[in-house]
Image: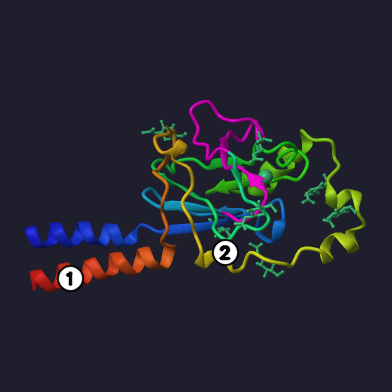
């Protein structure tokens, strides 16, 4: 009885995933990936690698407006010569409906479609959310201003090295909560794979002790 209870607890701990989302990768005005499928208990960790972005919760109906009581990373500015990068994360607590996010930097949501979704559906898709976001803007951004050809050629530069040098963000967002998402204290300096390895190790030790 006790054995099964302990194993069940450990298995459920192992099952929680950490997703990593790169914010501003290659100096673009994007989240990468733009959406994820996740379950309660999963952690979504945002790594800010360029410019000055936010991750701010909104509603599907008002994509570029902060939701009352939603989670918000606040502005995370990254100097062009930075060698460490802010990280902010939250834990999913209610995935019975999709969750929606945007960047609150001027124009990034409305003009560049910088939005993010957790568990979008066919009826409320990421594409529909982004289209709604862009509909609130001027219809002009760096892609529409420049020719399509030149716009696609300037992207590849830095940021792939960012994964190995993650710093902590400000503590200002440590105690927020919202429907569906709870922001955690910052300082997650381990990446997803490390976390999973750690939990698997705990599981192994637990089984070893009990057997
Ligand atoms: C940066 O650009 C490279 C090359 O195009 C691409 O493979 C990579 O996924 C991009 N990274 C992000 C975070 O967008
Ligand atoms: C999420 O799941 C849906 C099916 O429910 C699938 O179509 C979609 O590709 C998945 N998205 C991601 C980012 O894995
Ligand atoms: C980041 O952007 C916000 C909003 O535009 C601005 O208030 C803030 O000063 C910026 N931070 C830095 C360090 O430039
Ligand atoms: C980054 O550049 C700024 C201005 O050029 C300089 O003041 C700052 O010390 C540099 N920071 C690092 C970490 O090199
Ligand atoms: C979870 O989210 C759904 C949809 O937003 C909401 O109806 C429900 O009340 C929430 N449940 C809890 C326990 O907050
Ligand atoms: C720029 O605006 C166009 C037209 O509104 C839109 O299709 C595109 O997704 C926007 N963002 C980027 C990064 O091109
Ligand atoms: C668009 O052109 C401006 C000015 O020429 C340049 O700074 C910017 O990087 C270009 N944007 C893209 C996406 O190519
Ligand atoms: Cu932004």
Asked if residue 89 shows in the view, the reply is yes
- Quarter of the image where one finds residue 123: top right
Q: Position of residue 210 (x, y in %)?
A: 8, 69
Q: Is residue 59 placed above or below 90 in the rendered structure? A: above
Q: Is residue 146 left or right of residue 14?
A: right
Badge number at residue 162:
2
- Given residues 60 and 184, the one toward you in this image is 184
Regarding mark 1 in the picture, which secondary structure is present there? Answer: helix
The mark found on residue 205 in the picture is 1
SS category of the residue bearing label 2: helix
At horizontal 59% and vertical 30% (from top left) the residue drawn is 66
Q: Residue at x 84, y 52 (%)?
A: 143
Indicate which quadrant contains ligand 2: bottom right
Q: Pointer 1: residues within 10 angstroms few (<14), some, or many (20+)?
A: few
Can residue 31 be seen here? The reply is: no
- Magenta-highlighted residues: 48-74
| Relative depth, front residue between 100 and 141 | 141
Labels 1 and 2: the sequence-earlier one: 2
Q: Main secondary structure of the magenta part?
A: loop
Residue plotted at (39% across, 44% down): 185
């Amino acid at each position: 009885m006790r054995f099964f209870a302990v194993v069940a607890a450990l298995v459920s701990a192992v099952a929680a995933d950490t997703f990593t989302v790169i914010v501003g990768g290659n100096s673009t005005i994007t989240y990468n990936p733009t959406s994820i499928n996740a379950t309660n208990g999963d952690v979504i960790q945002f790594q800010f690698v360029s410019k000055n972005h936010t991750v701010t919760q909104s509603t599907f109906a008002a994509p570029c407006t902060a939701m009352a009581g939603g989670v918000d990373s606040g502005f995370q500015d990254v100097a062009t010569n930075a060698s460490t990068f802010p990280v902010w994360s939250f834990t999913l607590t209610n995935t019975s409906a999709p969750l929606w996010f945007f960047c609150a930097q001027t124009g990034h949501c409305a003009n560049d479609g910088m939005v993010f979704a957790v568990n979008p559906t066919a009826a409320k898709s990421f594409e529909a959310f982004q289209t709604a976001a862009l509909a609130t803007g001027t219809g002009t951004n760096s892609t529409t201003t420049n020719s399509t050809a030149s716009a696609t050629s300037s992207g590849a530069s830095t940021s792939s090295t960012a994964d190995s040098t993650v710093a902590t963000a400000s503590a200002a967002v440590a105690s927020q909560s919202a429907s569906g998402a709870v922001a955690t204290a910052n300082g997650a300096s381990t990446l997803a794979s490390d976390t999973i390895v750690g939990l698997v190790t705990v599981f192994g030790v637990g089984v070893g002790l009990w057997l």
